Amino acid sequence: MLTIVLRILSILGILIGVLFLITVALLLLVLFVPVTYRLSGAKGEEGFRISAKVKWLLGLVRFRYDYSERGELTAKILFFTVFRAKIPPDKAADGPEGTAGKAPRKIMTAVQKKKAPPAPEGKKTKASPKGAGSKTAPPETVGTERKISAEESASKTEKTAAEETEKSDAQEAASGTGNAAAKEAGKSDAQEAASGTGNAAAEEAGKPDTEDSVSGFGKILQKFEKIKYTIHNIYDKIKEIWDNISYYMELLQEEETRQFFSHIRLRAGMILKSMRPRHIRADILFGTGSPDTTGYLYGVYCMLSPVPKVGVSVVPDFEKAVLEADFDISGHITIWVLAVNTCRIALDKRLRRLIRRAVSPAKKAAHKKAA
C-alpha cells in the first residue's frame, strides 16, 4: 500500500515539475524573444504605398498592415488567419445579391393596412364558394325582424325616460338641502372674511411703508455691499489657486523630486534606446520647381545633418517640382527591457512620497470646505 502511494506521489511530482518547466519556458520566451517590426513604403507618380509588419515568437504570431488605395489589416497565428479587416471598411451593399437594378417591393405594415382607403363601391366582390352559409334571407323574414327591432327600441326609450325623471327628482331634493347648507356656510365665510380684512387693514396701518422708508442712498449702499461680497469671494478663490500653484512649484523644485525625475529620464531613455530602429534606408528625390527654394531646403538639411547618415540619400532636383521617396525601417523591441524599467519606476519610494504630498493639499481644501 505504501509503495502505491509513493508511486502516485512521484508521478504527481513529475507532472508538477513538467508543468513548472513549461511555464518557465513560456515566460522566458515572452520576456526575452524580441518583437520585430518593419516599416516600408514608397511615394511616386503612381501614388503612396506603405506596409507595416510585426512578428513575435519567431514569426508564429504575425500582424500586417498594407495601404495603397485603401488599408487592410491582417493577423495570423502559424498559418491560420485570425483577423482580417479593411480600413476604412467596405460600404454596405444596397441590397442582396441579384436584386441590383430592381425596384424594392413595398411591404405594408399592419398600421398602414388599417390606414389604407377602402375599396371603391361599384366593384364586384368575389363570389363566395358554393355550400357556404351566406344565403340571403327572404323578404318576409326581413320585414318581421324590422318590426321587432322597432318595438324593442320604443320600450327602451320609455324606460330611459322614467329613469331620467326619477334622477331629476332626487337631484332637486338634494339641491334644496345643499342650497340651505351653502347659504349658512356662505354667511359664516363672509363674516370671517370681513374680520380677516379688518385685521389685515389694521396691521398694514400699524406697519410703516418699507419701500418709502428705504431711500435711494440706501439702495446704492446695498448694491455696494453685494459688489464687495463678490469681490471678496473672487479674491479668496484666486488666493487659494495661487497657494496651490506655489505649493506645487516648491514641491517640484525640491532635491528629492529632481532626483526622481532624473531617474525617470534615465529609464525612459533606456526604453527608447531598446526600441530604436536598427536598420534605416531612405532614398529621397525632391524639388520645389524653383532653384533657389530647393537650394535653401537642401542647405538646411545639410546643416541639420553635417555627417552623412548611412543608408539615407537626399538628392535635390533644381529643374522641376517633384517628390519621390523609397524607405525601409526595421528594428525590434524586447519586452524584458520594458518590464524591468517600468517596474523600477513604479516601485520607487520617491514616487509614493510624491503622490502622497501632491494629494494632501486637495484633502486640506476639502476639509476646509466641509468645515
Image (tube, rainbow, N blue to C red):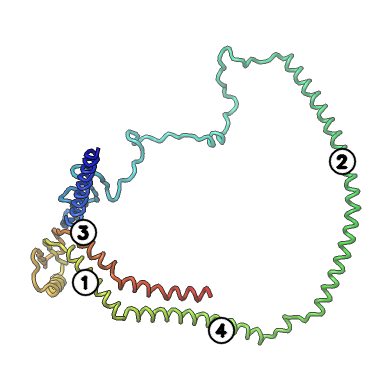
- Residue 168: image tag: 2
The percent coordinates of residue 119 (x first, y second) are 57, 29
Q: Is residue 204 above or below residue 180?
A: below
Q: Is residue 318 left or right of residue 92?
A: left
Callout 4, which amino acid? Lys
Q: Is residue 37 among the parts visible in the rendering?
A: no
Cα–Cα span, label 3 and label 4 = 62 Å
Specify whether 337 is left or right of 211: left
As rendered, which of 276 and 367 lies closer to the eye?
367
For the residues labelled 1 and 2, the Cα–Cα distance comes to 102 Å
Quadrant of the snapshot with the N terminus:
top left
Which is nearer the N-term, disc 1 or disc 3? 1
Q: Is residue 87 above or below residue 207?
A: above
Residue on which the image places disc 4: 228
Q: Are marks 1 and 2 in contact (CB under 8 Å)?
A: no
Of the image marks 3 and 4, the number of the one nearer the N terminus? 4
- Of the residues under marks 3 and 2, which one precedes in the sequence? 2
**Image location (x, y in percent) of residue 221:** 63, 86
Q: Residue at x 73, y 84 (%)?
A: 213
Q: Secondary structure at mark 4?
A: helix
Quadrant housing residue 127: top right
Residue where numbered disc 1 is placed: 266
* Three-letter code for the amino acid on which mark 2 is drawn: Ser
- Percent coordinates x, y for residue 65 in the rendering: 22, 51
Q: Which residue is mark 3?
A: 335
Residue 125 location (% of width, % of height): 57, 21
Name which residue type carries label 1: Leu
**Picture quadrant of residue 284:** bottom left
| Marks 1 and 3, how far apart at CA | 17 Å
**In contact (CB < 8 Å): disc 2 and disc 4:** no
Label 2, label 4: how far apart the Cα atoms are: 73 Å
Q: Residues within 10 Å of mark 4 (few under 14, many from 20)?
A: few
